[in-house]
Amino acid sequence: LDGLPDGVEAVRRGDLLFLLNHGREPVTVDLPGTHHDLLTRTTATDRITLGRYGAAVLKP
């Protein structure tokens, strides 16, 4: 992903996208399309908000 906020790490493993917020503040990350967050069982369209020190495991 391009243009990640400071403190956010993105790692792709196969078709999964792991997002990790290493920061003390929540951040919003722009996404290419719709993804399903396997941790929260929610759907994220175009963007996702990660809480402080938050994580997401996304599947298209």
Image (cartoon, rainbow, N blue to C red):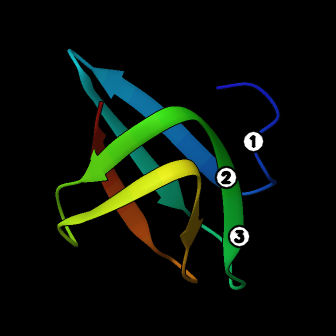
Amino acid on which disc 2 is placed: Val
Mark 2: few/some/many CA within 10 Å (<14, 14-19, 20+): some
The residue that mark 3 highlights is 27
The residue that mark 2 highlights is 29
Mark 3: few/some/many CA within 10 Å (<14, 14-19, 20+): some
Tags 2 and 3 touching, CB below 8 Å: yes
Q: Secondary structure at mark 3?
A: strand
Amino acid on which disc 1 is placed: Leu
User: In whole angstroms, how far apart are the C-alphas of marks 2 and 3?
Assistant: 7 Å
The residue that mark 1 highlights is 4
* Residue 18 drawn above or below residue 33: below
Image quarter of residue 31: top right
Kindly identify the residue that appears in the image at 75 percent across and 25 percent down.
2
* Residue 9 drawn above or below residue 6: above
Amino acid on which disc 3 is placed: Val
The answer to whether residue 42 is left or right of residue 10 is left
Q: Position of residue 37 (x, y in %)?
A: 27, 56
